[in-house]
């Protein structure tokens, strides 16, 4: 159970990071 929660949380954080990167790139243009 804990492992699955860790995995989902890590995936969510990476997804959030990607989103911020995309938004930053959009602002750059």
Image: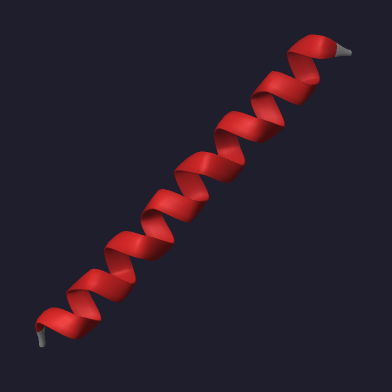
Can you say which quadrant of the picture contains the C terminus?
bottom left
Give the image location of residue 4, x and y in percent: 78, 20
Give the image location of residue 18, x and y in percent: 38, 55
Asked which quadrant contains residue 26, the reply is: bottom left
Give the image location of residue 24, x and y in percent: 23, 71
Total label count?
0
Toward the left, the furthest residue is 29
Q: Is residue 26 left or right of residue 5?
A: left
Say if 1 sits above or below 20 in the image: above
For the point 52% across and 41% down, the residue is 13
Toward the bottom, the furthest residue is 29
For the point 89% across and 13% down, the residue is 1
Say if 1 sits above or below 15 in the image: above
Asked which quadrant contains residue 2, the reply is: top right
Q: Is residue 26 left or right of residue 3?
A: left
Say if 24 sits above or below 10 in the image: below
Q: Is residue 25 left or right of residue 29?
A: right
Give the image location of residue 3, x and y in percent: 75, 11
The color scheme shown is secondary structure
For the point 39% across and 50% down, the residue is 17
Q: Is residue 27 left or right of residue 22?
A: left
């Amino acid at each position: 159970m804990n492992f699955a929660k860790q995995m989902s949380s890590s995936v969510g954080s990476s997804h959030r990071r990607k989103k911020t990167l995309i938004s930053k790139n959009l602002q750059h243009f």
